[in-house]
Image: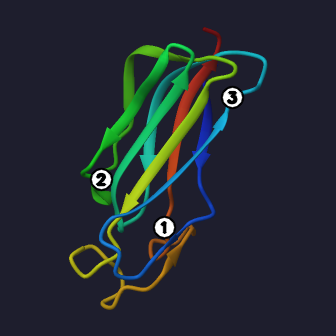
Amino acid sequence: RVFMLPLGSFDFEIPAGAEAHTHQDGFIWKQGFDVEILATFPHMHVLGSGYRAWVEAEDGEKCLVESERYDFDNQMTYEFKDPFVLRDGDTVRWQCTWNNSTSNPDRVFDDPVDTRYGERTDEEMCFFFMMGKIGG
């Protein structure tokens, strides 16, 4: 059985005019069991320009997904060749970068406005949907 683990941030504000505003978030996986991560799907809206998700474990930092070329019109699900094992006690981190300036041709507003979390396209998101299964 595969489940979806939505990782996301709700407490960010992207200042109007910011060409590369980055927000980082994370948490410690303390569920009492390990999870095999099979795939991830990074998601932002039209101001999104880059993203990264990684795990900090006892044996070091491991990147799950990273790109400096986010494209709202070409969102991808990244399936891992081998499952990534998220162990109880590992720290999961993610960050999103947005371009809320006039240099972004995909912006919604001609004059950029401060933008916060929301589900509409004129608002923003910073999510990583992970597909996984209990085990590992």
Question: Which residue of the protein is positioned furthest toward the right in this rendering?
Answer: 32
Does 107 sit above or below residue 9? below
**Disc 2 residue type?**
Tyr
Question: Between tags 3 and 1, which lies in front?
Answer: 3
Residue 112: where, in percent of width, then height? 36, 85
Q: Quadrant of residue 64?
A: top left
Q: Secondary structure at mark 3?
A: loop
Mark 3 Cα shell of 10 Å, populated few (<14), some (14-19), many (≥20): some
The quarter of the picture where residue 136 lies is top right
Comparing 75 with 96, the one in front is: 96
In the displayed structure image, the side of residue 114 where residue 79 appears, left or right: left
Mark positioned earlier in the residue sequence (2 or 1): 2
- Please name the residue shown 57% across and 68% down the image: 117
Front of the two marks 3 and 2: 3
Three-letter amino acid code at the position of disc 3? Trp
Find residue 48 and report its horizontal and vertical position in percent: 36, 61
Indicate left or right for 17 with 58 as reference: left
Placement of 116 over or under 111, stated as above or below: above
CA neighbours of label 1 inside 10 A, class few (<14), some (14 to 19), many (20+):
many
Write down the residue under mark 1. Answer: 124
Mark 2–mark 1 Cα distance, whole angstroms, equals: 13 Å
The image's mark for residue 29 is 3
- Residue under the point 35% across and 81% down: 108
How far is the residue under mark 3 from the one under mark 1?
25 Å
In the image, which disc is placed on residue 70? 2
Q: Amino acid at mark 1?
A: Glu
First-in-chain label (3 vs 1): 3
The first of marks 3 and 2 along the sequence is: 3
As drawn, 5 above or below 127: above
Of 122 and 100, the residue lying toward us: 100
Q: Position of residue 80 (x, y in %)?
A: 39, 21
The local secondary structure at tag 2 comes to: loop
